[in-house]
Amino acid sequence: MRLFSTIAALFVLAAPLAAFAGPVNINTADAETISAELKGVGLAKAKAIVEYRKKHGPFRSADDLSLVKGIGERTVEINRADIKVRDSAK
């Protein structure tokens, strides 16, 4: 029973860390950072985002992310608050 309590306590303490995501600037971040910070975006999709950015230039809005093959509007909506396209200092 004590082992179960310890495991449950660790889960409760670690859950907020696992749920934390973003924000991430999709115009400057590498694929590993994008995949780590955006929900539902694995490394393959993150690499596609970086390749699209290299080919077409910087994203102007979060909605532009849906132009990348494999990134749907739902993914954009889930992550909208964490998708940045400009430096926050500006």
Image: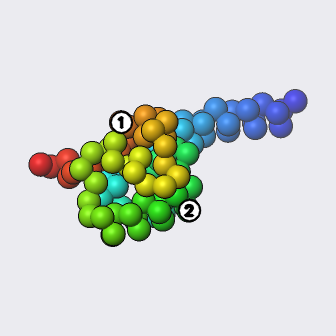
Amino acid type for the residue under numbered disc 1: Ala
Q: Residue at x 75, y 38 (%)?
A: 7
Please tell me how many numbered marks the rendered image carries.
Answer: 2
Amino acid type for the residue under numbered disc 2: Ala
Above or below, 65 against 76 in this view is below
What percent of the width, then of the height, locates residue 65?
A: 38, 49
Q: Residues within 10 Å of mark 2 (few under 14, many from 20)?
A: few
Nearer to us in this view, 84 or 21 = 84
Label 2: which secondary element: helix
Q: Residues within 10 Å of mark 1 (few under 14, many from 20)?
A: few
Q: Residue at x 49, y 55 (%)?
A: 69
Along the horizontal axis of the image, is 10 left or right of 41?
Answer: right
Residue labelled with disc 1: 81
Label 1: which secondary element: helix
Nearer to us in this view, 59 or 21 = 59
Kindly report the distance in space between the C-alpha atoms of the residues bearing marks 2 and 1: 22 Å
Along the horizontal axis of the image, is 75 left or right of 90?
Answer: right
Residue labelled with disc 2: 44
Q: Is residue 22 visible?
A: no
Q: Residue at x 30, y 64 (%)?
A: 56
What percent of the width, then of the height, locates residue 6?
A: 75, 36
Q: Is residue 83 visible?
A: yes
What percent of the width, then of the height, locates residue 36?
A: 50, 54
What percent of the width, then of the height, locates residue 66?
A: 41, 46
Q: Residue at x 67, y 38 (%)?
A: 10
* Outermost residue toward the left in this view: 90
Above or below, 60 against 10 in this view is below
